[in-house]
Amino acid sequence: MTAIQHWLANPFLVWPVFIGLSLASSWVTSMISGWRALADRYASGADQFRGQRRYLQSGAMRWRLHYNNILTIGADEGGLYLGVLFLFRAGHPPLYIPWREISVVERQGWFFSYVDFHFNALPDLKLTVTKKLGAAVAREGGRPIASELTLYREL
């Protein structure tokens, strides 16, 4: 048995390495996607959220980094709640972002319509979700959705 085979056959060595790499991967993902930047500003208010949560949702953030079927999204009159499935929580604390710091914009992709949640304090950062999900969340929060064309006309 070679050294690598011996190492892979020992669960006391493989599991800690696997768990460590998973945690590191989740942490790096939070940095790249912009979640950490949001967490620096909005992680402390997540316990104030009182609305309905939608579990196992999908969305994309900076650099088209996708959170497929691991997002928890909710809205109430105060703001937008964002969380991730507990297995991927490293570097991703739950967030509660006040509506006054979010712009909601509908846009047309190649085949589908999407809703972008732009974070005013971090202009290079947005969360993109399907139109159906985005419209439902905006409605629950009492937020209007601007169209992309309307924004261009205003400029």
Image: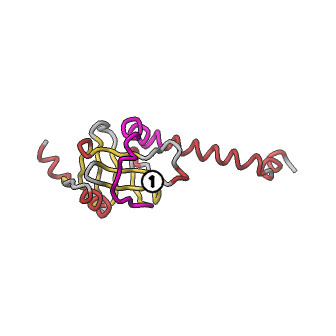
Q: Which residues are magenta?
A: 30-56
Q: Residue furthest left?
A: 154
Label 1 neighbour load within 10 Å: few <14, some 14-19, many 20+: some
Residue corresponding to mark 1: 67
Query: Going by the image, does 96 lie left or right of 100?
Result: right
Residue 112 quadrant: bottom left
**In magenta stretch: residue 77:** no
Q: Position of residue 117 (x, y in %)?
A: 29, 49
Residue in the picture at 27% in, 48% down = 78
Q: Amino acid at mark 1?
A: Tyr
**Which image quadrant is residue 110 in?**
bottom left
Vertical placement of 64 versus 39: above or below? Answer: below
Query: Disc 1 on helix, strand or loop?
Result: strand
Q: Describe residue 28's horizontal placement relative to residue 57 as left or right.
A: right
Q: Nearer the viewer, residue 61 or 3?
A: 61
Residue 3, by quadrant, is top right
Q: What residue do we see at 34% from left, 52% from top?
A: 128
State how the image is colored.
Answer: secondary structure
Judge whether 42 appears above or below 106 on screen: above
Q: Position of residue 54 (x, y in %)?
A: 39, 61
Could you tell me what secondary structure mostly forms the magenta stretch?
helix
Of 59 and 91, the residue lying toward us: 91
Quadrant (top left, top right, bottom left, bottom right) of the C terminus:
top left
Q: Name the residue located 38 percent from the left edge and 40 percent from the top edge.
A: 38
Asked if the stretch drawn in magenta spans residue 55, the answer is yes
